[in-house]
Amino acid sequence: MKIYTKTGDEGMTALFGGTRVPKHHIRIQSYGTVDELNSWLGLLRDQDISKEYQDLLMKIQKDLFTVGAILATDPEKAVLKSGKERLNIPKISAADVTLLEEAMDKMDASLSPMTHFVLPGGHQTVSYCHIARTVCRRAERMACLLHENQPFEATVLSYLNRLSDYLFVLSRKLSFDLKADEIKWIPEKKG
């Protein structure tokens, strides 16, 4: 099987189920941004960080493939007239969301309380984490817009929301672990 099919040369692509849509469709933007996020998480996972973080990031990357599959599926083609699911797509569960919350609680226990916004940076690994966080927020915004027009399982939105929170807490924990400066944003008074 060749990678190139030439079927997208005129700006159209196929969803799971066969429906063709423009490549700029919000559904394509949504799962494309999830794919971008997954790539940033791969780069973060490749850094010199603890195996515990690497293992959870690997699980998150697998979850994001599930999220992408859900977002890439035409809802009208996902279920047969009999009500049975046509495509064998896994689900994002409440347990997946809870796992992120528990990981945040564990990291938070060793961090000082937040008193100010934090400027991204301080260490290359921390910066990669912040980039992943902002891409996750964009994926969430796009998925919310898609969900308004073509609803899908709401746990996907919860997962993306919690994942961006997790990546913020992870960035703080990585700063702590790497002994990097966590630079607080303190607005300067002008005038």
Image (cartoon, grey):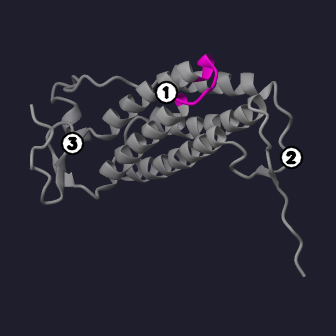
Direction from residue 172 to residue 148 in the image, left or right? left
Decide if residue 40 is on the left or right side of residue 88: right
Is residue 112 visible to the viewer in this orientation of the structure?
yes
Q: Amino acid at mark 2?
A: Thr
Which SS class for mark 3? loop
The quadrant of the picture occupied by the C terminus is: bottom right
Is 41 placed above or below 14 here? Answer: above
Front-lying residue, 13 or 71: 13
Residue at left offset 14%, top offset 52%: 8
Relative horizontal placement of residue 184, taking residue 20 as reference (left or right): right
Kind of residue at disc 1: Ile
| C-alpha distance separating marks 1 and 2 | 29 Å
Q: Which residue is mark 2?
A: 115
Is residue 103 depicted above or below 70 in this figure?
Answer: above
User: Which residues fall within the magenta stretch?
Assistant: 45-53
Q: Is residue 178 magenta?
A: no
- Amino acid under disc 3: Leu
Residue 142's spot in the image, x, y percent? Answer: 43, 52
User: Where 40 sits versus 144, above or below?
Assistant: above
Kind of element beneath mark 2: loop
Which label number is shown at residue 15?
3
